Amino acid sequence: MSDPILSVQNLCVYFELSGDGWFGSKKTLHAVEGVSFDLAKGETLGIVGESGCGKSTLARAVLGLVPITSGAVNFAGRDLAKLSANKLREQRRHLQIIFQDPLSSLDPRMNVGQIIAEPLRSYFPKMNQQERQVKVVEMMRHVGLLPEHINRYPHEFSGGQAQRIGIARALILQPEVVVCDEPVSALDVSIKAQIVNLLADLQAQFGVSMLFIAHDLASVRHVSRRVMVLYLGKVMELAPWDEIYRAPRHPYTQALIQAIPPADPRRARANPAKPLGGELPSPINPPSGCVFRTRCPHTIERCAQEVPVLRPVGGSFVACHLAEQIARPEGFQ
Amino acid sequence: MPGELLLEAKKLSVEFATDEGVVRAVSEVDLELFAGETLAIVGESGSGKSQMLLSILGLVAGNASVTGSARFKGEELVSAAEHRLNEIRGSEIGVVFQDPMTSLNPYLTIGLQLTEPLRLHKGATRKDAAEQAIEMLKSVHISEPERRMDQYPHQLSGGMRQRVAIAMGLICRPQILIADEPTTALDVTVQAQVLSLLREIRERFGTAIILVTHDLGVIAELAERVNVMYAGKIVERGSVDDIFYRCRHPYTEALERSIPQFTEIRPARLDAISGNPPNPVHLPSGCAFHPRCPYRLDVCDQSVPVLESVGPAHAKACFYEGPLLTVTESRA
């Protein structure tokens, strides 16, 4: 890989919680625990995990929106965690985010033109009105919005259109990295595909790098060639899509795949979606050793004693003591 | 052979008086539900799928007017008195909503919420009701049911809350369970838990289920018959195999093509449906899907297609008679 645009090293984000009662001891919530990855220029890395796995906290930590407990976020050779507020603000221009709920992430009292122009106003206060207008109209065309709608307000748009406004706002500064935090989860099926296609097109056109966060594997397939699977704040598996598809090695990755209903009645009758047993442990008091062991069908004694490190197995990186022994489960499509 | 006819809707319509004019959310829908079967209603937001069911339950908003007929075992519900609806709801027809956090009362313990319908509808004593509630919590695989009875909803995980909500819907052993997007707010592994639970319940109690969802994966897992709704109308209905392997409506086809699948072959692009769902205040003329339809004919913006039979128990509302591009039996 050529020099990565973004390199995250051993990132930890903890939140201090007050204890029970007045004098209870403080508790620590481990939201992100030792996550490392590189993002190449123009690459999209899919980040997949369920509620509470730390994917959104990870995204916000990368952008400097939540304080980092330890570790480094290197963007273009600089550690963002060590920058002063002013310097960080300067770098943020190159790092943008697209949120899950398009309507709640747009100011209802600003019209579309003002919303998309806001980042320009903030970073280029000297730019004149006309120049700004030209850029906004151009960006509206890129994301498939009609320029004549520039004076409309967010509530006049459907969910899919509102998400296009959010995308235009994120791209107007021509950022290097865009973090997409579940950008299609709140959209209707027929609109989801439009937005996924749009993001893929824009990426090809502008060459931005993306972190694409989703809660299921199927939605990242069309945008990313590499996937990172998170569970309880830790990386379980980091692998190219083809490896994830052909040989998912971590038991949690396998469970995620088996839980997908196949949208094919005959296959569903033969092989119904398989639930993962047990409940998600508390991130305040995670299990010792491997965090997945309490729900893993393959657990051995070693799993409770020794934390598995992320290590290369075949073409993937897997954090599991048994990665070599675990066979591809029955019932894969 | 289908069992007893439990629910029958005829020309059921729901209209809302709004500032922008009258909005017809549901337009002359016919529906049949037989004992023990699972009927799915699929559609996107604004297609009227939830409003149709709320109108059957008498739960529509104050500015709505419901016309047509909806009969539960022959008894008219649309004009039924509130006290009679109260008797039916929760007792004969149970409901599970999308978001368990908003359908459970945060101030009341699980035990109180689970036993209330039993005490109200069945006149059960406190002790009997508690025993039945614990039994029902066991049926929906809640661990330590006795302890959960004294807990509040916020003390449970999302998946557990939805299972408690299902337990509440089932506690009076209703003949019909209406599940309105029961897995949409859940993670995929938790969704699989809820789907397998609904399958189990169907087998164990013989409950007929009306499943409202926009997720075709969920339908393939659970449904026997499917109604596809668009802009307040049913545009196609058939067995689950008709809908997945022999669909005849362009909208059904488009829905199926646009879902991201977990497959190895990675097409460069997803087949997106162009355009946006229509605004219910200003529906397109003729067939409401015509502005987005790749098979559009001249007649489509002028006349409204009606549901016509295209096979045993399979019907479509579409003028286009030719083959659809992607529909081949070989897909199986």
Image: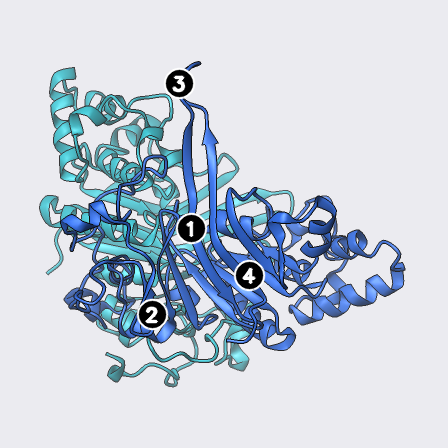
Chain colours: A blue, B cyan
- Residue A330: name its quadrant: bottom left
Residue where numbered disc 2 is placed? A316
Q: Residue B33 in the image: x percent, y percent?
A: 23, 52
Front in this rendered view, residue B237 or B219: B219
Q: Is residue B6 visible?
A: no
Which numbered disc, 1 or 2, marks the residue closer to the eye?
1
- Chain label for disc 2: A
Q: Which mark is residue A24?
A: 3
- Residue B103: name its quadrant: top left
Q: How many residues crowd mark 1 within 10 Å: few (<14), some (14–19), many (20+)? A: some
Disc 2/disc 3 C-alpha distance (Å): 43 Å
Q: Is residue A206 left or right of residue B269?
A: right
Q: Residue A267 in the image: x percent, y percent?
A: 20, 70
- Residue B223: name its quadrant: bottom left
Which numbered disc, 2 or 4, marks the residue closer to the eye?
2
Disc 2/disc 4 C-alpha distance (Å): 45 Å
- Chain label for disc 1: A
Q: Residue B39 in the image: x percent, y percent?
A: 25, 56
Residues flagged by tags 3 and 1 on a common chain: yes
Disc 1/disc 2 C-alpha distance (Å): 18 Å
Which numbered disc, 3 or 1, marks the residue closer to the eye?
1
Q: Three-letter amino acid code at disc 4?
A: Pro
Residue where numbered disc 1 is placed? A34
Q: SS at mark 4? A: loop
Q: Spot the residue most to the top.
A: A22
Disc 3/disc 1 C-alpha distance (Å): 28 Å
Q: SS at mark 1? A: strand
Contact between marks 3 and 1 (CB within 8 A): the answer is: no
Residue at left offset 38%, top offset 72%: A241
Q: Is residue B66 left or right of residue A325?
A: right
Mark 2 vs mark 3: which is more N-terminal? 3
Contact between marks 2 and 3 (CB within 8 A): the answer is: no
